[in-house]
């Protein structure tokens, strides 16, 4: 996605998100933040690393994508249960937010270090998304000088 010369409404020219946490709640919020930025024409790059890489795992033998197995911050349960509860309250579901980010042109990147640390192969990731492999240097070079960077 091409960056605009002028940030929308005085906001950053680009949003670069490091998605580090293995918590469903935090990864879900990173996707919500990215979708919001994209909706106002702010380009976004999401770098999934360390525990958050599991959110991009392909479905297991039971048909559960990786994010459904992520732990939640409070209240117990897993990502699947929390997602159903949020969706029942009219809050965007994980798959909905992830699909919106992809459709609106977000760059979805997975950190090579995060893959190695988690013992995850690129072949273990979802194949319905365009996922770029990269590292911190790639991510930092992708960031805009007049953009914003968040660590979640």
Image (cartoon, rainbow, N blue to C red):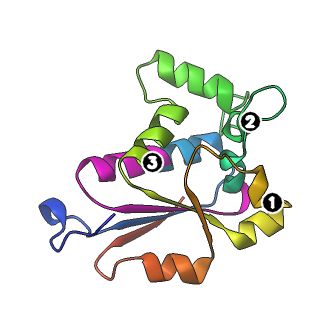
Residue picked out by circle 1:
121
Crowd tier of the residue under label 3, counting other residues whose Cα lies within 10 Å: few below 14, some 14–19, many 20 or above = some
Give left or right: position of 63 versus 141: right
Question: Image quarter for residue 10?
Answer: bottom left
**Label 1 element class:** loop
Q: Is residue 39 magenta?
A: yes
From the viewer's perspective, is residue 70 above or below residue 20? above
Give the left or right position of residue 131, taking residue 123 as reference.
left
Cα separation between marks 3 and 1: 21 Å
For the residues labelled 3 and 2, say whether their Cβ atoms are less than 8 Å apart: no
Which badge, 3 or 1, is on the more N-terminal residue? 3
Depth check, front residue: 121 or 27? 121
Q: Does residue 52 appear left or right of residue 138 in this picture?
A: right
**Any mark on residue 59, and which?**
2
Q: Earlier in the sequence, mark 1 or mark 2?
A: 2
Of 91 and 119, nearer the camera is 119
Query: At x 33% / y 83%, what residue is drawn?
Result: 145
Circle 3: element type: helix
Q: Is residue 47 magenta?
A: yes
Mark 3, residue position:
102
Residue 3 position within the rendered picture, expressed as x and y whole percent measured from the top left: 27, 69
Magenta part of the chain: 31-51
Mark closest to the chain's N terminus, 3 or 2? 2
Measuring from the top left, give residue 77's x and y in whole percent.
Answer: 73, 27
In space, the residues marked 1 and 2 are separated at their CA atoms by 14 Å
> Which residue is located at x 38 percent, y 54 percent?
105
Element type at marker 2? loop
Answer with left or right where residue 118 lies relative to residue 38: right
């Amino acid at each position: 996605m091409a960056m605009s010369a002028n940030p929308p409404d005085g906001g950053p020219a680009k949003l670069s998100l490091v998605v580090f946490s293995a918590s469903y709640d935090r990864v879900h919020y990173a996707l919500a933040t990215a979708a919001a930025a994209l909706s106002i024409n702010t380009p976004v790059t999401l770098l999934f690393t360390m525990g958050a890489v599991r959110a991009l795992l392909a479905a297991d033998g039971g048909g559960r994508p990786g994010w459904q197995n992520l732990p939640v911050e409070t209240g117990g349960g897993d990502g699947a249960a929390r997602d159903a509860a949020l969706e029942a309250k009219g809050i965007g579901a994980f798959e909905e937010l992830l699909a919106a980010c992809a459709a609106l042109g977000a760059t979805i990147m997975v950190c090579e270090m995060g893959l190695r640390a988690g013992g995850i192969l690129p072949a273990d990731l979802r194949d319905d998304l365009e996922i770029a492999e990269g590292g911190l240097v790639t991510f930092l070079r992708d960031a805009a000088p007049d953009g914003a960077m968040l660590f979640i």
